[in-house]
Structures are given as C-alpha cells and as structure tokens.
Image: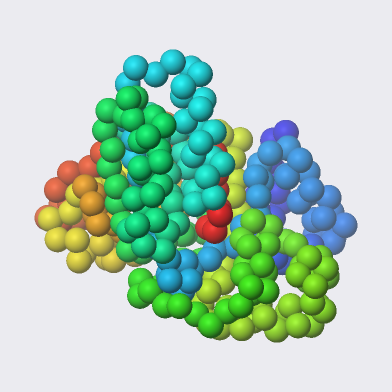
Amino acid sequence: MSLDLLDKKILYYLDLNSRSTAKQIAKLVRAKKETVHFRINRLKESGYIKNFLTTIHTSQLNKYYYKIFYKFHNLNPQSYKQIITHIKTDSKTAWFGEFEGPYDLAFLIIAESIYDLEEFTNKFKAKFGKHILEQEIHVLTSVHRFNLKFFYQGKGQLHTKYPKQLTKSKIDNKDLQIISLLSNNARISLLDIAKKVNLDSSTVNYRIKKLKKQKVIGTHTLAVDFNKFQVQHYQINFKLINPRVSEKIIAYFSQIKNATFATTTIGKYDLAVEFVAKDNRELRGLIDQAKEKFQSQIQSHDTFLIVKEHNVTWLP
C-alpha cells in the first residue's frame, strides 16, 4: 500500500488529535465521512498506524521517567530474547527500543522513587548481570513530543510537554482506570470506558475534562511504524556546555519537520532528540544545521539508529 495525499492529511490531523471523529477529520480534509472512516481503518490494518495514544503527564502523578541504556556481551540469541521479553513485560516499562550505536537498547521505566529504580535494576542484574558490559541511567526532567509532519505539513502545530514539578494530583482509582484506558487507546469511546470502569458516560466525560484541567492527561496522538514511510528513526544524544540552553534548542527542533521527540536529562547526556530521515546524508544535514546554529553550546553528540520499537506508551 502506498499513501496518497488524502491518507497523509488524515494521518496529520489524527496526530494532532487522535480522538477526532471521522466526521471532524472529514471537514478538515474535505472528504466524505465514510471515506475517512475507511481510510483510518486501512491505515491501521496495513500497519502505518500502530496505536492511538494519549500523552500522560506522569509528573502530575508524582512519578518520573528513568531512561536506562545497556550494552551487552557474550550474548546468544536465546539470552537476548529473554532480555527483550523481560523488559517488554515488566509493569514499569513504558517506551522500549533496540539500537545500533553506542548501546544495544534503551528503555524508559516509570517510578515513584529511586528505590523503585533500584529494585528494577537489581532484579535485572540478578538475572542478566553476566551479559551487561555497560549501563547508563538518566533521569528525564522534561519530555517534549512534536506532532508528526515529516510526511505532510498542514495547518496547526503541536508541541506537547509535561510539567517538571512533581505533583500528587487528587485522583482516585476510577480516574487511574480512565487514564490507563486512554493512554493506550485514545480512540476508545466514552461508552466503552464507562462500561469498563462502571460509571455512566457523562461522569466519564466530566472526569476526563477534570484530568485535562489538572494537566494529568495531555494530548491524543499517534504511534506510527516509521519503516512503512521508508524513513529511518534516529535518536541523537547531545552533551551541552550549558544545559540551560536546552529549551532554545528544543524550540528550534520543534519547527523542523523531521524532529519528533525531545527529552532533557540528568546523566551522561543533557538532551536527546529523535528524528526521522531518509538516509544518513539527510540526518547529517539536520545535525550540521543544528551544530552551526548552536555551535557555542553543543559540546558533542552520539547517534543512535532505532532499529525496533517494542513498547510505545506514556503510562504502562
């Protein structure tokens, strides 16, 4: 299946708000509602759309993301498969990807404290310690998602980020159930949520609005298979001379159509930015432009090719 202009427009507006109805998107793309509904289903069935996600501001749940990098040695295929399964199925794992570059893989876990992190790493080392060559841990201090525009640039732009300050929002178990359902299926209907949490749909709608006002729930977006678009997915990790300029650098990248994601961190690197590019030549051009603009601030960078994404969620 190859994408035409209508497919690209639908993807673009779904990524701005993946809870938009077929009727709402039809008005934006000037097509029939039935056509848009058919195209959305086809894009999902053909694998372009992996999932409809809701961004969750975990800092408002008094939790932080920690990013863990691993380099392995003396691994056979069976042991590597066990490692992948262990990370994928752990209840703390959010995003998880395999790399080509300085590390073999990296993943995000969500934890309430350093003790949660220690429990995770100790359990991992107890099982796979003999294969670990290097381990690197970062604390994510901010997360920024840019709307996908590498395939089409329409009206509207989205720069989602969560607040840095940890806050314990006043939410109950019903709220947590709603958050969990939306985080991994942004297009789930109010009626279906109501059935699963044993509330009426008007109450569910009220609670969602309240959670958005509290900045627990962010925006509704897409997870896509970049390989389907014939582009490669990269993560560039920067060491900055002065980390305080990271906001300016992120603002710059947010305007570039190839940039999809950015995080600021405490650790070996100060800033990580994700890009899609057709090839290494296009990627080098993007990096060279950034280095020229911020040459007095970028100390060095490492390039990672994201070979495969296993988990893509904001709240496991």
Q: In front: 122, or 184?
A: 122
Q: In front: 189, or 255?
A: 189
Q: Is residue 15 visible?
A: no
Residue 238 in the image, given as x and y percentages of width and height: 24, 48
Q: Residue at x 73, y 37 (%)?
A: 46
Residue 25 in the image, given as x and y percentages of width and height: 73, 64
Q: Quick check: 203 above or below 265?
A: below
Q: Residue at x 82, y 55 (%)?
A: 37
Q: In which quarter of the image is residue 228?
A: top right
Q: Residue at x 67, y 69 (%)?
A: 178
Q: Can residue 312 be seen in this view?
A: yes
**The C terminus: image quadrant:** bottom right
Q: In front: 258, or 218?
A: 218
Q: Quadrant of residue 194?
A: bottom right
- For this view, does 178 lie left or right of residue 34? left
Report the label total: 0
Q: Quick check: 61 above or below 236?
A: below
Q: In front: 288, or 189?
A: 189
Q: In which quarter of the image is residue 283?
A: top left
Q: How is the image coloured?
A: rainbow
Q: Residue at x 14, y 61 (%)?
A: 242
Residue 76 in the image, given as x and y percentages of width and height: 44, 15
**The N terminus: image quadrant:** top right
- For this view, does 307 lie left or right of residue 201? left
Q: Residue furthest right?
A: 34
Residue 288 in the image, given as x and y percentages of width and height: 25, 43
